Image (cartoon, rainbow, N blue to C red):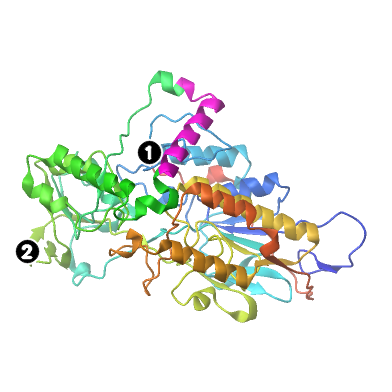
Amino acid sequence: MRALPGGSKLLRTSSSRKIKPSVAIIGAGFGGIGAAVKLKEAGFSRITIVERAQGPGGTWWHNTYPGAEVDTPSVLYSYSWMPWNWTRTHVRQSELQEYLEAVIGRYDLARHMHFGTTVDRVVWDESRQEYEVWSADRVVVRATHVISAVGLLGDPKIPDWDGLEDFTGPVFHAAQWQHDVDLSGRRVAVVGSGSTAAQLVPALSEYAKEVITFQREPGWVVPKRSREYTRTERAALNSRIAQRFLRTKFVLLRERDQVGGALWREGTKVNTAARLGALAHIERVLGDRPDLAEAVTPTHPFAGKRPVISDGFYQALLKENVKLVPRAVKGVVRSGLVDSNGEHHDVDAIVLATGFKADFLTTYDVIGRNGTSLHELWRGEETAFLGIMAKNVPNFFMLYGPNTNGGTIVTNLELQIDYVVGAIKAAHRRGASAVEISPLAQDLYDSAIQRRLEGTTFHFENNYYRSKTGRISTQWPEGVIVYAILTKLLRWPLWRFSFEVGRSDEKRPPQMQPEPFEQRAAIPR
């Protein structure tokens, strides 16, 4: 016997016709949208995409701050199966949002999407062999399979400074930009010195009276070399062959530096060259300001923290209306901030570029077999086979999961999506009610990954790569080619299939019926 959607039962017959499984996708960013497209192409149309935001795009829906753009070449920050005629070498937020909307339109995904729904937990129902997706104390979706596409860095990290509630001006995180707050002609504090701050500070300096940026510790900065494409280049991008050539070129250039994890190992030629290049960038821009040069020069190894890729951050520090405070924030008073030296800095607004929580599945919990929480199974040491499947959690898949960060993000997502669709297809062909990874396979895989991570710069610094126990839970130690090979080879021999059939006559709630996408709130520009 096999289970039908809705909990009905049907004796298995010789007929080749099988009811297609239902799939709930949590998150409508690059991962969720890409997964929906590939599921539909594979013949699985019973898809529901649940998104807590009021529109699609994931991190690019939320991050609408001034200067927001990708650090990866635009042709790589897009799906290989849907090239785009980009206007810039490194696309800005609004154009990337336009691209994702075009994907949604081309593949008719809007009717599968439900926005403004925050998932609280995902619970496996053993009797039905399906998941309940909960939001606000009610089941909103039941599905055979669940794909988590919430990403890694989606939950803003808000500092708990003393006195923050006493500040009289506006305070908001960069990922929660308040577009109704006019910062023109005002004194603005930017707290943080990572990738977001490196984009924000130059942009704000164009219209704010003063920008004071607080740097707890400097990061390595390398030039992005971002620019507009010429008319000739844009004409060439209309060719799929040209797009594929560029994609291949950029992937191979990255692969050259990441083979064997060379970029992440101090003392290798690649790591040393990258460090010297970053030092040369400091000298080239700030050579006439030894005070600034000293303040922004890191003491940790290159790639001990995520490198910052920026053409304008150092240049902005030279402006008269930009001030660098090379110290952490200690507290907040009514009129501004107090740094770790006790110095007061009066400001009119505070923008938090303080990063994101780097724990996986921070916004909801997953309850697998025997009522066990995935967070309890992890106990602060997140692990998953290929970053996709976790033992004892059947029919549940993660995109951008543990130990998959550090490569070409969209390329990795495509590989993971292909793996997930392959697992769902394999279960469907076999008439299985569930598919999961072999516990032994996951344990052996995780041991191998942790061995490969030994001796990398990921261990050296206060970064988001490590869990509370010190384990490197986010990073992938090799290049994308090795990961691609593994996702192709490590499949059905390592999957376990279940053919259990439960029983229940409980009436199912109706499938979520989203409103037409065009009727929703306009995307902020």
For the point 70% across and 76% down, the residue is: 126
- How far from the left and from the top, in percent, is residue 202? 22, 42
Picture disc at residue 55: none
- Tell me the quarter of the image containing the C terminus: top left
For the point 74% across and 60% down, the residue is: 427
Amino acid bearing label 1: Arg
Q: Label 1 vs label 2: CA separation?
A: 36 Å
Please give the range of residues in magenta.
235-256
Q: Nearer the viewer, residue 520 or 447?
A: 447
Q: Which residue is mark 1?
A: 92
Amino acid bearing label 2: Glu
Tell me where residue 325 sits by quadrant: bottom left
On whether residue 245 falls in the magenta region, the answer is yes
- How far from the left and from the top, in percent, is residue 488? 63, 51
- How far from the left and from the top, in percent, is residue 215? 18, 57
Tell me where residue 344 sits by quadrant: bottom left
User: Is 340 on the left-hand or right-hand side of 277?
Assistant: left
Q: Sort mark 2 into few (<14), some (14-19) or many (20+) by Cα contacts within 10 Å.
A: few
User: Is 505 on the left-hand or right-hand side of 253?
Assistant: right
Q: Nearer the viewer, residue 48 or 263?
A: 263
321 relative to 175, above or below: above
Marks 1 & 2, CB-CB < 8 Å contact: no
Secondary structure category for the residue under label 2: loop
Q: Is residue 200 visible?
A: no
Q: Which residue is mark 2?
A: 343
On whether residue 206 falls in the magenta region, the answer is no
370 relative to 273, above or below: below
